[in-house]
Image (cartoon, grey):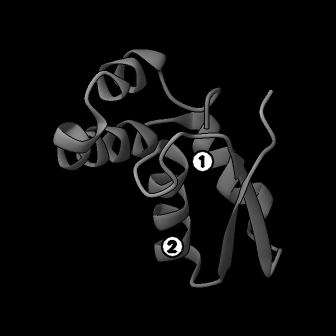
Amino acid sequence: GKNIALNDIRYWFHADPINRWAAFKSRYTAELNQSETFMKFRQLIQPHDIVILPYNPHDNKHNNTVVMANMIETKKLTNIHTSREADS
C-alpha cells in the first residue's frame, strides 16, 4: 500500500486515525481509483484465488491495507487476507 498511493493522505490520517477514518477511507479509495499502479496491481492479482496483503499497523481495523482489501474484494469477490508483519 505504501507505494501505490501518495503518502500525504496516510500521514494526515495517522495523526488522528479514529476521528479521520471515514474521511480517510473516502479519500484513499478515490486516490487508489486514479492510481495506475493500483490498477496494475489488481490486474496482477486477478488470476489468484487468494491474495495476502501484509501490513504493520498499530490498529488492524483502521489502516490503508483494510481499504485496499475492501476495494479488491469488491472488484474481485475472492478471498483477501491481511497479514500483520513482524515489527520492521
Amino acid under disc 1: Met
Q: Is residue 39 left or right of residue 32?
A: right
Q: Residue at x 55, y 49 (%)?
A: 65
Mark 1 surroundings: few (<14), some (14-19) or many (≥20) residues within 10 A: few
Amino acid under disc 2: Lys
Looking at the rendered structure, the secondary structure element under dot 1 is: helix
Q: What residue does disc 1 label? A: 39
**Which comes before the other along the chain, label 1 or label 2?**
1
Q: Residue 6: x, y in percent?
A: 47, 21
Q: What residue does disc 2 label? A: 75
Residue 23 vs residue 77, the one in the foreground? 23
Q: Residue at x 55, y 62 (%)?
A: 69
Q: Residue 37: x, y in percent?
A: 63, 35
Residue 31 occupies quadrant: top left
Q: Residue 8: x, y in percent?
A: 38, 15
Position of the C terminus, as image quadrant, is top right
Q: Is residue 34 above or below residue 67?
A: above
Q: Report, in whole angstroms, how far the alpha carbon at label 1 lies from the one at label 2.
A: 11 Å
